[in-house]
Image (tube, rainbow, N blue to C red):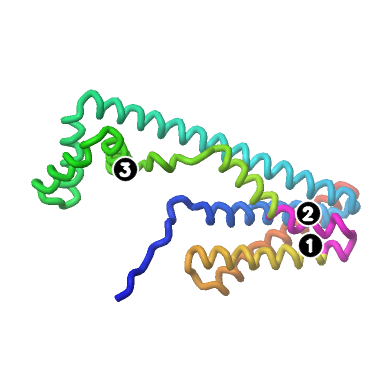
Amino acid sequence: MGDHHHRRLQGGGARAAVLGVSDGLLTNVLLVLGFVGANPGPGVVRFAGVFGLIAGAVSMAAGEYVSMRAQRELLEAELALERREISQRPEGERRELVRIYENRGVEPGVARTLASEMMRTPELALDTHAREELGIDPGGLGNPLQAAAASFSTFAVGALVPLVPWLVTRGTAATVASLVAAGLAALGVGAALAVYTRLNLWWTALRQFVFVAAVAAAGYGIGAALGVSVHG
């Protein structure tokens, strides 16, 4: 039998990128179609779409930065505490590893040998305790700036899709082009999610398309209702 390989799923970089594009697409579809429904004029629709893109991307980036920064600082504090414990009471930490391995079904003698080997150097001991006791990968705590930049760019890409037609034309042509572009982008996002999750491609793509279409219809309807009430 041939070897089979599992993909690395915990990092979630590809998933985060696809979801960032999806968030931007849904947000600006709702905003742009809402303003189209209110019928304030093409200049206002363009302004709303551009400002929605900027505000949403900045908000996503700031939220991601603050969240990851707080998470990283918490994990670093836990690692510092573990490092201190390993330095000050190595025997107690070795016994903790023995108990962890035994609880996982490793024979006591093998568990003791394995724990002693893992405690051989401070670096290996910290890495082992971080993974086995805390569930932390010391080398994968994440970079808040990179995460913020990724959130900003992926959201902006998605938000740009329904906006582009309004930057080059106006009226019915822009509305139709915006809907078509959003629909195609929704199918693409759904297909990307299907590839990542190994779900049925057509079902996942169609589901995403229907979701975006519903958001567009809701945005247009709300915009039309509010526009009538404001002008009427």
Count of marks overlaid on the render: 3
Q: Marks 2/3: CA distance?
A: 46 Å
Give the amino acid type for the residue marked by disc 2 in the picture.
Answer: Val
- Disc 2 versus disc 1: distance between alpha carbons? 9 Å
Q: Quadrant of the N terminus?
A: bottom left
Identify the amino acid type marked 3: Arg
Residue at the farthest bottom position: 1
Q: Which residue is located at x 53 percent, y 56 percent? A: 14
- 228 or 128, which lies in front? 128
- Residue sticking out furthest to the left: 109
The spot of residue 166 in percent (x, y) is 84, 56
Q: Magenta segment, which residues? A: 158-175
Secondary element type, mark 3: helix
Q: Which one is closest to the eye, mark 2 or mark 1?
A: 1
Which mark lies nearer to you, 2 or 3? Answer: 3
Q: Which mark is residue 178?
A: 1
Q: Residues within 10 Å of mark 3 (few under 14, many from 20)?
A: few
Which residue is at a point 35% across and 28% down the rendered structure image? 80
- Residue 210 in sight: no
Q: Which residue is mark 3?
A: 131
Q: Is residue 85 left or right of residue 215?
A: left
Is 133 drawn above or below residue 182 in the view shown?
above
* Mark earlier in primary sequence (2, 3): 2
Q: Is residue 188 above or below residue 39?
A: below
Residue indicated by mark 2:
32
Name the residue rendered at 64%, 51% in the picture: 154
Q: Position of residue 210 (x, y in %)?
A: 64, 67
Element marked by disc 1: helix
Q: Is residue 191 left or right of residue 51?
A: left
Task: Name the residue at 49% across, 69% down.
Answer: 199
Name the residue type under label 1: Ser
Taking the image as shown, residue 157 lies to the left or right of residue 74, namely: right
